[in-house]
Image (cartoon, rainbow, N blue to C red):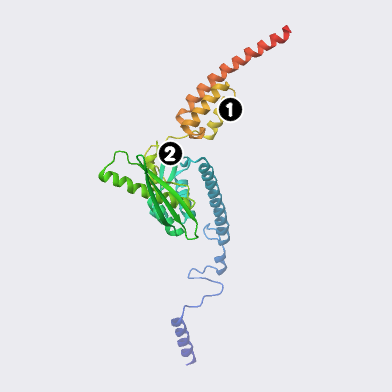
Amino acid sequence: MNLCKEGAASGKHQQDGPPRLNSSRCGSNHTPSNGLNQSLSGVPSIGTKKTDGGKMNQELALKREEDFSAIEQVVMQGDLSRLSAEQRVTYYRKVCESAGLNPFTNPFAYILLNGKLTLYAKKDCTEQLRKIHGVSIEELDDKLIDDIYVVTAKARDKHGRVDQAKGAVVLGHLKGEARANAIMKCETKAKRRVTLSICGMGWTDESEIDSIPNAQPVEIDLGTGEIKADVIKPKLSSDQVEELRTILDDCEGKYQKWVYDYVKKTFNDFTGVPADMYDQIKAAAIKNREKNSEHLQVENQADMLVEVAQ
């Protein structure tokens, strides 16, 4: 009778919860319980995973630092075409984040200006900035100077700071709807320019793109950073720039000035020179260097003869 009760009690216990395990065994395969703290089939233990994870985090942090360092150098030069596609995505998002803008609304777009790839502000950018900074347009003054229509916009932000900016368009012989559209565009340009100014954003607004010589909008996939059209030529590398400058240092003074003036006028700096011009510039510079070297040798010999004669 006692055995039946004990059996019933034992059965009841099994129904109420899982069976108890032997303290020295685990599971149906009788794996020793202390085996759970050991690595199985070559799988690293939890402690090893943490170590690997820490190492991976360090590598990722190092990569991010290198990416940001490259981005910083390129941004200082003002040419985003030197960034990789992934770095362009990172830079775009960081710009939006720093300004409090929503990157998914595409507040910026890319433009090729003076051979360099940069960003310009779109309509969504200025509208979001007005909301974020509480910018209100208080006054709009317009006037016609010859055939140029000028609008001055005065704005105030939520802190009471006041700023103003002008927008201008050439009306010329425009009439009817074309003239009306030009006037409205001028007002829009003034509003957007004063918004960017009062918010401390030094970007070019899209309403100004048409009036900038040689400005060329560039279509770039904002999700991947890939340039969709082959409109940007690779630029000289830092090593190539350094080599050209070293060669030019030994060239004739007038030739040096001519080259540097041409580069400054056309590309702003050697970093903006297309890579396919490298061989041409280098060959011409080497030729001038050799000629200058021969000239200096002749002058030195002449000087020596003068000294001997004296």
From this viewpoint, is residue 223 visible?
no
Q: Nearer the viewer, residue 62 or 106?
A: 106
**What's under tag 2, amino acid-wise?**
Leu
> Relative to 255, is 68 above or below?
below
Residue sitting at the far top: 309
Residue sitting at the far bottom: 1
Q: Position of residue 39 (x, y in %)?
A: 55, 60
Residue placed under numbered mark 2 in the picture: 113
Q: Is mark 1 on a helix, strand or loop?
A: helix
Residue placed under numbered mark 1 in the picture: 246
What separation in Å lies between label 2 and label 1 (alpha carbons)? 28 Å
Quadrant where the image shows the C terminus: top right
Residue 216, located in which quarter of the rendered image? top left
Residue sitting at the far left: 176
Question: In the picture provided, is 206 more to the left or to the right than 42?
Answer: left
Q: Which of 180 and 267 is in front in this view?
A: 180
Nearer the viewer's eye, disc 2 or disc 1?
2
Question: In the picture provided, is 61 more to the left or to the right than 226?
Answer: right
Q: Position of residue 113 (x, y in %)?
A: 43, 38
Q: Which mark is residue 198?
A: none
> Relative to 239, is 159 above or below?
below
Q: Do the numbered discs 2 and 1 sit on residues whose CB atoms are within 8 Å?
A: no
Q: Where is residue 307 in the image (x, y as percent from the top left)?
A: 72, 10
Q: Residue at x 48, y 55 (%)?
A: 162
Mark 2 surroundings within 10 Å by alpha-carbon count, few (fewer than 14), some (14 through 19), many (20 or more) = some
